[in-house]
Image (spheres, grey):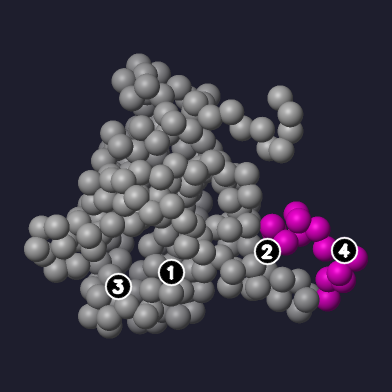
Amino acid sequence: MAKLYPEFTEAELRAFSLEKGALPRHVGVIMDGNGRWAKKRILPRSAGHRAGMEALREIVRFSHSAGIEALTVYAFSTENWSRPRAEVDALFSLLEEYFYKEIDELDANGVRIRIIGDASAFSGKLHDLLDSAVRRTSGNSGLCFNIALNYGSRAEIVHAVSSLIDDGVKSADLSESIIDSRLYTAGLPELDLIIRTAGEQRLSNFLLWQAAYAEFVFTSVLFPDFTPEEYAKCLVEYAHRTRKFGKVL
């Protein structure tokens, strides 16, 4: 399959008011507002999730074309199991559909897929699809597309520390870098930017450790309406920030 979304030229980036050197390397997105989008249109929540899936497709394409190295999206949290069973089943069905439809395009464009979270909770068809997508794209060198499934940041930190204890690492030898190496995001660029859609201004247990020095951008746009143009606005806002990392500049 031919590449469908090559990297933007400098002129194309400028059309979005973006400059390559000012882009974040790693972006996290809390995809919020699917249900509210559907409710406004008197549609079932599943219709909102489907519209969100379409929006995500364009965000992945834009991220790749802009030259962003890693995109991490919050798709299903450890708390989302408490939602009605019908909604959870609809979400999983959409995930299956996404991988069936998108894997060829993602692979052809060099996108590398990683699943972060406790994937052991998934079984059957979805588990096989996730595993196949990860293995198939593991050698790709383009955008690293991380999908947070059954993910909670506190559980991630507990898992990291537990693995160190199991390996006999002594407390005197603990360091931030050692803990970082056991997180699901090990090996990725530092998280530069977290975007949350739909007007909420909280992290909801998403990448708490990784967000230590990340910039936050909150937008009132519901995720199904989060177009590449809206995404670019968030990237421009990030580019205008002065990042101090605790230092006096």
Between label 1 and label 3, give the one nearer the viewer.
1
Type of residue at label 4? Asp
* Residues at discs 4 and 3 in contact (Cβ within 8 Å): no
Query: Residue 121, position in %: x, y?
Result: 45, 80
Amino acid under disc 1: Ser
How many badges with numbers are in the image?
Answer: 4
Which residue is at a point 40% across and 50% down the rendered structure image? Answer: 196
- Choose the circle earlier in sequence order: 1 or 2: 1
Residue 180 appears at what percent x and percent y? 69, 57
Front position in the image: 142 or 191: 191
Label of residue 77 in the image: 1
- Please state which amino acid type lies under the numbered disc 3: Phe
The amino acid type found where label 2 is placed reads Arg
The magenta segment? 168-182
CB atoms of marks 3 and 2 within 8 Å: no
Secondary structure beneath disc 3? helix
Q: Is residue 105 magenta?
A: no
Q: Residue furthest top?
A: 11
Q: Is residue 211 visible?
A: yes
* Dot 1 and dot 4 residues touching (CB under 8 Å): no
Of callouts 1 and 4, the N-terminal one: 1
Q: Look at 42% across and 59% down and name the residue there.
A: 74
> Mark 1 to mark 2: distance in Å?
19 Å
Residue assigned mark 3: 92
Query: What residue is shown with label 2?
Result: 182
Task: Count neighbours of disc 4 (C-alpha within 10 A) and say few if under 14, some if 14 to 19, many if 20 or more.
Answer: few
Instruction: Kindly indicate whether the residue at mark 4 contacts the one at mark 2 (C-beta within 8 angstroms).
Output: no
